[in-house]
Image: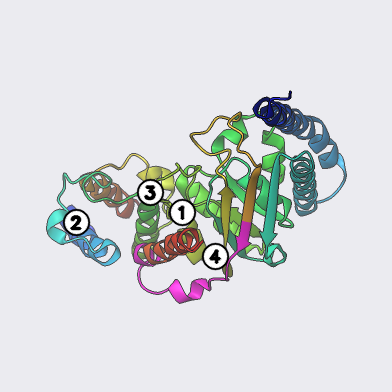
Amino acid sequence: MAHPDRTAARPFRDLYYVRLVTTGLCFALFGVGGALLGIVVVPILLAVPGNRAARRRRIRRMIRLAFRFFVGFMNQTGGISYSFAGAERLGRPGQLIVANHPSLIDVVLLIAFTPDAGCVVKRAAWRNPAMVIAVSAAGYVPNGPTDLMIERATALLSAGECLIMFPEGTRTVPDHTVHFHRGAASVALRAARVVTPVFIRVEPPSLGKTMRWYQLPNPRAHFALRVGSDIDPVAFRNGPAPIASRALNEHLVALSAAEAAGN
Amino acid sequence: MHDRDAILGELRATMLELFELEPARVTLDARLYDDLEIDSIDAIDLMDRLRRQTGRKIASERFRSVRTVSDLVEAIYQLVNET
């Protein structure tokens, strides 16, 4: 006679190991694929004639298509599911996109769906041989030193490009309140034509700061992105800069908290 | 702003306006970050204000080693008294 418990337990266990392997494959694809793109493909693309702006657009497009492919791959292999409401509103000239940062793949998701975007990225990327040529050619902005970050981000927005920033600077620690550094608010006040928040939720939590890659949730994690209403920076551009940037920053934090609480 | 006392006076007024800091707190030995809670973004905004006030181009590097109000007064003093 069959033992119902044993037969029921087996498919779940197999499923976990299968998902473990496909998750491992995703990490490997990102690592190896990324290195190949960064070291081999990017230099080839840069060798094609064109001015700096044309090269920058070309590299950003390559990154976006690669990330878009990777998101599709994770989705098709059952690693993640995702929804992205309002993505068509991203990628406007002078737009500063600010997003919270619950997981490792937030930047991948945002760049995959935002045409021709710059991004403020950890300084370490410029010391990484697989990334340095790509991030430089794409015109990404290192997140430090602070004065240079502000200067470069401001120049980028003033030139009519679109910029992605994560004001938390690092992934949110679960159960900790969200803390936004004022760099994004300061940049917004200096040069943004419009500020657009993007709210990212991961259910159940996955790829977070304190989690191990093999702690796979069941069912697979769902990444829900929602593009919030535009914020007009002009409304905050009054009074001394330190006071104005605190006001805008508090507004962004409040929006993030409201989004988290409202669901 | 040609002597250090005048510079300190101006600085106190500026910090009151920018950071709502009571002048009494802005003592020469006060540390910008630890005592007055002026972070890196505030420092940039302060430098922008100083650039406008002095009419000089100030390179950020000049202020990287500034830690206390006294350091800041000294840096401004050097700046305005350059030919």
In this rendering, which labeled residue sits more in front, label 4 or label 1?
1
Q: What residue is disc 2 on? A: B8
Circle 3 chain:
B
Q: Are marks 2 and 3 on the same chain?
A: yes
Q: Which residues are magenta?
A: A225-244
Secondary structure found at label 3: helix
Q: Is residue B34 magenta?
A: no
Pointer 1 chain: A
Q: Is residue B71 visible?
A: yes
Chain on which label 2 sits? B
User: Between A52 and A75, which is closer to the camera in this rendering?
Assistant: A75
Left/right of residue B76 with respect to residue A131 in the rendered view: left
Same chain? Circles 2 and 4: no
Q: How is the image coloured?
A: rainbow
Q: Amino acid at mark 4?
A: Ala
| Depicted B81 relative to depicted A23: above or below | below
Residue B58 at x, y percent in the picture: 41, 52
Q: Quarter holding the N terminus of chain A?
A: top right
- Residue extending furthest right? A48
Amino acid tagged 1: Gly
Tag shown at residue A191: 4
Q: Residues within 10 Å of mark 1 (few under 14, many from 20)?
A: many
- How packed mark 3 is, by other alpha carbons closer than 10 Å (few <14, some 14-19, many 20 or more), is some
Mark-to-mark CA distance, 1 and 3: 9 Å
What percent of the width, then of the height, locates residue A263? 51, 61
Distance from Cα at disc 2 to Cα at disc 3: 21 Å
What residue is pinned by disc 3?
Answer: B40
- Return the residue found at the far front: A1
Callouts 2 and 3 close, C-beta under 8 Å: no
- Whether tag 2 and tag 1 are in contact, CB under 8 A, the answer is no
Chain letter of the residue carrying label 4: A
> Where's residue A202, x and y in %?
58, 48
